Amino acid sequence: MKIAIEGMDGVGKTTLAKKLAQEYNFKYIEKPLMDFFEIDNLDTKAIYDQICDKLYQFNSEIPKAWFFGLGNVYTFLKYKDENIIIDRHFASNYFWNGTEETNCIFKTMIDLIGVPDLTIVLYASVETRNNRLKSRDALDRDISDPEKQVLGSDKMMMFLDDFHIPYVLINTEGKTKEDVFNEARSIIDRLQLDIFSRKRRR
């Protein structure tokens, strides 16, 4: 089973993804591209950051969609026979790099590797997300990034609908980490039961 956890910074993606991976004994994948490039020290991380900076400065979403999509493709191929929880996947890439021009890129990747069995989109207000980011790091650059001061989940949902990717929404506003975990666990338990029932009927 492949499960993607999506949402803007500060919604609680990483906390939920790690907890779900532990609960179900799934492999947790946080940064697929860093796994692909075998980035495991500060020197290789610096090179990776330079590549990303070059892409961010380039006035086109096309190379960015391909580059960050490479991590999604690699992850699905490398772990095709394993159960995994992915911290960000297609929907996050589309939020930043999805345009009419790049739709064909996302379609190609989906045609090649398929889609997660379930995408869980977490969302919360901009104010709540910023407060959470400040509590972790008052100097977090995301707090002052105007491009991140949007709900975000609306564009992700549009992409998931357009590409027929199964997903659920979880509002993390005013909820504890345990509340969100229990809601997600209930959804996954139902999905596993449904998959098991379909296999038995074959």
Image (tube, grey):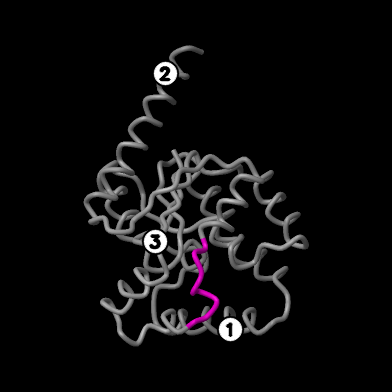
Q: Amino acid at mark 3?
A: Ala
* Quarter-of-image position of residue 69: bottom right
Callout 1: SS: helix
Q: Is 123 left, or right, of 189 in this rendering?
A: right
Q: Earlier in the sequence, mark 2 or mark 1?
A: 1
Which mark is nearer the camera, 3 or 1?
3
Q: Is 23 left, or right, of 153 in this rendering?
A: left
The residue that disc 3 covers is 124
Location of the N terminus (image quadrant):
top left
| Front one among 41 and 200 | 200
Q: Are there few (<14), some (14-19), or many (20+) residues within 10 Å of tag 3?
A: many
Q: Amino acid at mark 2?
A: Ser
Q: Earlier in the sequence, mark 3 or mark 2?
A: 3
Q: Residue at x 72, y 57 (%)?
A: 105
The residue that disc 1 covers is 53
Q: Are there few (<14), some (14-19), or many (20+) residues within 10 Å of tag 1?
A: few
The residue that disc 2 covers is 197
Q: Earlier in the sequence, mark 3 or mark 1?
A: 1
Pointers 3 and 2 in contact (CB under 8 A)? no
Q: Amino acid at mark 1?
A: Asp
| Front one among 21 and 167 | 167
Callout 2: SS: helix
Pointers 3 and 1 in contact (CB under 8 A)? no
Magenta segment main secondary structure: loop
* Quarter-of-image position of residue 193: top left
Q: Residue at x 70, y 71 (%)?
A: 61
Q: Position of residue 28 (x, y in %)?
A: 36, 53
Q: Between marks 2 and 1, how big is the CA–CA gap? A: 47 Å
Q: Which residues are magenta?
A: 145-152
Q: Position of residue 59 (x, y in %)?
A: 72, 80
Q: Position of residue 3 (x, y in %)?
A: 44, 45
Residue 151 among those drawn in magenta: yes
